[in-house]
Image: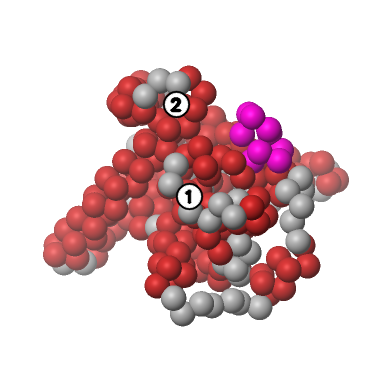
Amino acid sequence: MPEKKPADKPPDKTRALSPKGGGKSSLLRQTFAILGPGVITGAADDDPSGISTYSVAGAAYGYATLWIALLTFPLMSAVQLMCARLGIVTGQGLAAAVRDNYPRWVLWGACSILVVANVINIGADLGGMAEATQLITGIRPLVWIPFYALLILGLLMWTSYKLIARVFKWMTLVLFAYVLASFFAHVDWKQALVVTLVPHLEWSRGFLAVLVGILGTTISPYLFFWQAAEEVEEERAKGKTTVAQRKGATAEELKDARTDTVIGMFFSNFIMYFIILTTGATLHAHGQTNITTAREAAEALRPLAGNGA
């Protein structure tokens, strides 16, 4: 990929450069400082629709699908890293890059598929958020769906990317509830380890449908566009408003992007693994193998949170 000298493009101040001493605490601080688009994208993959899919897998088949996390991690890392590099080096999003390098029918085809996938995914996410809020407030989801849609639209229109990115980065910590819950759920760790390392397959329509669902919600098309777009937003937040200003990347910027993206994809698959593990140890183990509501999915967290699940 084309590379500019650091003199032509100042080092990225938002993403810290590689640590050069200062001990373990300094290393952790500087590593956390470079986390951004990759981690946010990874956490976004564990959205309400993703959590629902993983919960269904764990409830229906127990630990049987845990091995998929080992398969999807390298695939996600490779694809998302390509998208991150594309955004950093070209200074444009994925759609713009496709427009500049491929025929129009490729652009329109890719964007049409993205629109369909996004509309369905956004609808599922808003519905999941509304159902979760109903459990707390008792107010019908039909009230919360437009509320959340307008709230997110307002944030996009009247706040900054930097603020939203910072808030989302900290909100990802909520997902560790599934990791903590697994230690209260009487997991059969020996069986879980065996199934993780030795893939289990069932040649049934239901099991194959769950596999397709997991792969589809984990390696999702909108993440490709999102990753590249977030890299561009990172540059814009630093005042690089034109494509010419954003083009090119230093070796340090590419290295930091790789660290951010790989950690983000690991986080995404790590959480997916523990959602399946926890629901398998709770719902499946107690005969609740068919999840249809947010309330049923939330039962997986009961060993940790009780009625607060």
The quarter of the picture where residue 103 lies is bottom left
Q: Nearer the viewer, mark 1 or mark 2?
A: 1
Near mark 1 (Cα within 10 A), the count class, few <14, some 14-19 or many ≥20, is some
Near mark 2 (Cα within 10 A), the count class, few <14, some 14-19 or many ≥20, is some
Residue 134 is tagged as 2
Residue 262 lies, with reference to residue 165, above or below; the image says below
Q: Is residue 304 magenta?
A: yes
Residue 190 is tagged as none
Q: Residue at x 37, y 36 (%)?
A: 126
Residues shaded magenta? 301-309
Main SS, magenta residues: helix
Q: Residue at x 53, y 34 (%)?
A: 168
Between residue 16 and residue 220, name the one nearer to us.
220
Which residue is most to the right? 23
Q: How is the image coloured?
A: secondary structure
Label 1 sits on a secondary structure element that is loop
Residue 291 is tagged as 1
Amino acid type, mark 1: Ile
Residue 160 lies, with reference to residue 48, above or below; the image says above
> How far from the left and from the top, in percent, is residue 291?
48, 49
Q: Is residue 100 magenta?
A: no
Label 1, label 2: how far apart the Cα atoms are: 17 Å
Q: Residue at x 24, y 65 (%)?
A: 101
Please report whichever mark, 1 or 2, sits nearer to the chain's N-terminal start: 2
